[in-house]
């Protein structure tokens, strides 16, 4: 993503704007995690690897913060995530 919004927020319904802002935050954090983990895999410098993996871990925390608030606002998402979890348990037996 690297700072380009994947959607035009001006076209989002007013009642959905907060959920979309949180989703965009989640996308940005996941993008950052991917970037940092790729950079860590490319370097042989242990200090750089340690640093960028630590930052990637922090971005995962940020992702969780956005998700926690989104789950408060989007009950349909909560229900669908639970259905998905159940399907995985049924498929894997775990």
Image (cartoon, rainbow, N blue to C red):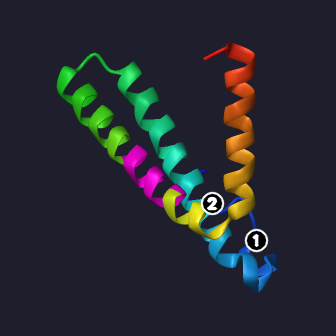
* Magenta region includes residue 63: yes
Bounds of the magenta segment:
59-67
**Image height check: is 23 above or below 19?**
above
Q: Residue at x 59, y 52 (%)?
A: 27
Q: Residue at x 75, y 48 (%)?
A: 80
- Closer to the camera: disc 2 or disc 1? 2
Q: Is residue 75 magenta?
A: no
- Residue 66 % position (x, y): 50, 60
Determine crowd level at label 1: few under 14, some 14-19, many 20+ residues with C-alpha closer than 10 A: few
Residue 86 occupies which quadrant of the picture? Answer: top right
Q: Which mark is residue 23?
A: 2
Is disc 1 placed on a helix, strand or loop? loop
Above/below status of 15 relative to 93: below
79 vs 11, nearest the viewer: 79
Measure how far apart labels 2 and 1 are at the Cα level: 13 Å
Helix, strand or loop at mark 2: helix
Q: Position of residue 77 (x, y in %)?
A: 71, 55
Packing grade of label 2 (10 A; few <14, some 14-19, many >=20) is some
Q: Is residue 36 above or below residue 16?
A: above
List the single residue furthest toward the bottom.
Answer: 14
**Where on the picture, by quarter, is residue 76?**
bottom right
At horizontal 63% and vertical 60% (from top left) the residue drawn is 23
Identify the residue position indicated by label 1 in the image.
8
Query: Quarter of the image containing the C terminus?
Result: top right
């Amino acid at each position: 993503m690297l700072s380009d919004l994947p959607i035009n927020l001006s076209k989002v319904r007013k009642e959905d704007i907060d959920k979309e802002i949180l989703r965009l935050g989640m996308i940005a954090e996941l993008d950052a995690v991917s970037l940092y983990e790729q950079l860590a895999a490319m370097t042989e410098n242990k200090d750089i690897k340690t640093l960028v993996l630590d930052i990637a871990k922090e971005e995962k925390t940020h992702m969780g913060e956005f998700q926690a608030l989104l789950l408060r606002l989007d009950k349909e998402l909560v229900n669908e995530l639970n259905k998905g979890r159940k399907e995985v348990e049924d498929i894997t037996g775990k």
